[in-house]
Image (cartoon, helix red, strand yellow):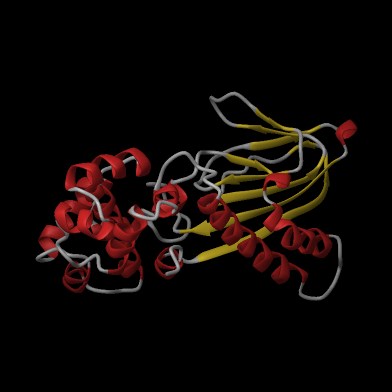
Amino acid sequence: MDRLAPFFEQFTLSARMFYSGAFCGISPNLDEQAGYLHVLKEGRLTIAHPNARPIVVDTPSIVFLPRPHEHRLHASEEERTELICATVEFGTGMLNPLTASFPEPFVVPLDALPELAPTLELLFSESSSDYPGRQTALDRLFEYVLVLLFRSAMNAHLVDSGVLLGLSDDRLSKAIGAMHKQPEISWSLEQLAQISGMSRARFAAHFRKVVGITPFDYLTNWRLGVAQTMLRKGSSLKLIATAVGYTNATALTRVFTRRLGMSPSDWLTRSKPGTVKNQS
């Protein structure tokens, strides 16, 4: 079973490279309504956030900001800093539990990710070229880097909690996979525990400890994330409610509004390009 496949089926992943090469000075304010992926090839980089202490990265690393997060990059001329940067869209403004698993920012040294080395080598090589199709090649390579990063974070337990850690647990992953596959089912704690091969009490406690929320909170978030995707595709509330386990459109709207602070129609209006607000 591909444990990551449901996320890519529900949320569209796209990246756009916007900078590559030597860097010194201070960047413009990076405040797109998207995530960011910075790959530091060499040198020293300072990431400054409003109302937060600066983060200094002084070894080749990936810096992933999974949610819209205003920041600036600083580097001195003496540091000989070289990096490649991209914006990342992966369910921005939606309840995507995969990106919610990551801290803000997520910094990991490149030498801790040996499985990414061949792809990063391609990324570095393409960024220093002037071949036709360079922008498209770099965009697709950044997307692949992100897929590999998700895979490594799950397999190597690079995050402390969240669904990625849950998916790395052989027992919990069975229940999470069942919820992903059939959000329309009225899952009971007993059913989910049985799928995981655990007692009800042990399953509930273990799920909360590993994933960080209760099984039913996770199920609700997943259902609403699926509902958001269907809303963007133009599905009716009646059809969406049935698909994600609610008896009718009114029940779905009530849960949606309680969780996100606005009705489905209001969310859809605000989620159009240029108006997306982060809700993860």
271 versus 60 height, above or below: below
Residue 186 lies left or right of residue 195; in this view the side is: left
Viewer-side residue, 110 vs 14: 110
Coordinates of residue 166 in the picture (x, y in percent): 39, 50
At x 67%, y 65%, the residue is 139
At x 44%, y 46%, the residue is 101
Is residue 197 at all visible to an observer of this figure? yes
At x 78%, y 34%, the residue is 44
Coordinates of residue 177 in the picture (x, y in percent): 33, 63
At x 82%, y 38%, the residue is 43
Coordinates of residue 232 in the picture (x, y in percent): 35, 68
Quadrant placement of the N terminus:
bottom left
Quarter of the figure with residue 29: top right
Residue 235 lies left or right of residue 247; in this view the side is: right
Q: Report the number of numbered marks.
A: 0
Is residue 93 at all visible to an observer of this figure? no
Quarter of the figure with residue 86: bottom right
Viewer-side residue, 77 vs 185: 185
Coordinates of residue 228 in the picture (x, y in percent): 32, 62
